Amino acid sequence: MTEVTVTTRVAVTGATGFIGAAVCRALHEAGYGVRILARSPQRAQPLAGCVDEVVQGDLHNADALARLVDGAGAVVHCAGAVRGASQAAFDRINVQGVENLVAALAGGSARLLSLSSLAAREPSLSLYAMSKYRGERVLQEKAGELRWMALRPPAVYGPGDRELLPLFRLMAKGIAPVPGHPDARFSMIFVEDIAALILAWLAQVEPATGVFTLDDGTPGGYNWRDVSQAVERLCKRRVRLVPVPAPVMDIPAWINRALARLIGYAPMLTPEKLRELRHPDWVCDSRALRQVLDWQPRYRLEAGLAKTPGWCGRLSG
């Protein structure tokens, strides 16, 4: 990696989220100056030790975006909507937000790394997946001379995660709920490996452009038995796979859909999200990415879980 000085500034959106916070910590430890976009200084307070400057605003505030990118050598776009009641709600952040950021970067020399999602591979499955796919299309069609890379990570876990941690806690107690077929396969990646990838991208003199998938290097990914066995080894107890009957999830998903239409509630569990969860193949790999970037994932699932605190009493993280 090239030598980094504290005058090298990187702007980050979505810094208060799980992945964004890990990216900010890695950037700070590597010697980069970190400027973030946040709706309020209070939301950014947990990052006080690794952030040099907070720009108050959001992805729809042109002045805030101009201040965010001014003088930055690179922008890491981690912000995104993961729940919503309509396609428009997802698109407002995941499509229009990308378009606004591209507009703010137009004519400058900064590069852009945008976090998409593996869900974009199957845009017909859900409103979220379609919005992520459309966000990638913005980069492909409107970025012009902007040097950009979009990443499609699979399931991301690690310190600070709030989505998968409850599942791992339940598995640590001996129960692994399986929402779809037990042989469905999926890739995973530890959050610190994403942060390391971004550091490698920043070190490139001429970064590659395009959409790339990434994983932890496990050929063929994992199934639910693989995950339960990793938990068994770490927590020293048997984990039983428990298929979840379809109505147990279908009914609350449709209730959420009705509430969303009635009161504007933005649910996570929807019929569309269930189609994502039950999709049998979320396997990907990093081969194309590793051809253009000097990066290798360090953590496969068991090693990553061993570094993740707060889910298994035998682990300190």
Image (spheres, helix red, strand yellow):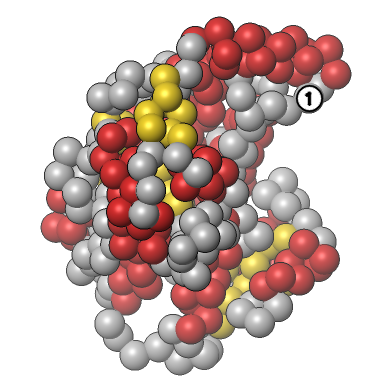
Q: How many marks?
A: 1
Q: Position of residue 86 (x, y in %)?
A: 66, 20
Q: Residue at x 38, y 48 (%)?
A: 237
Amino acid type at mark 1:
Tyr
Tell me the SS state at disc 1.
loop
Q: From the viewer's perspective, is 303 left or right of 38?
A: left
Q: Residue at x 47, y 18 (%)?
A: 244
**Picture quarter containing residue 252?**
top right
| Residue 5 can be seen, yes or no | yes
Quarter placement of the N terminus: bottom left
Q: Residue at x 26, y 66 (%)?
A: 298
Quick check: 234 above or below 298? above
**Picture quarter containing residue 284?**
top left
**Between residues 93 and 285, which one lies in front from this camera angle?**
285
Quick check: 143 above or below 39? above
**Between residues 178 and 218, which one lies in front from this camera angle?**
178
Sort mark 1 into few (<14), some (14-19) or many (20+) by Cα contacts within 10 Å. Answer: some
**Between residues 213 and 147, which one lies in front from this camera angle?**
213
Q: From the viewer's perspective, is 194 left or right of 226?
A: right
Q: Position of residue 90 (x, y in %)?
A: 62, 30
Question: Which residue is denoted by mark 1 in the rendering?
Answer: 265
Q: Position of residue 184 (x, y in %)?
A: 29, 25
Quick check: 44 above or below 220? below
The residue positioned farthest toward the front in the image shown = 237
Quick check: 110 above or below 243? below
The residue positioned farthest toward the right in the image shown = 263
**Between residues 267 and 150, which one lies in front from this camera angle?**
267
| Residue 153 can be seen, yes or no | no
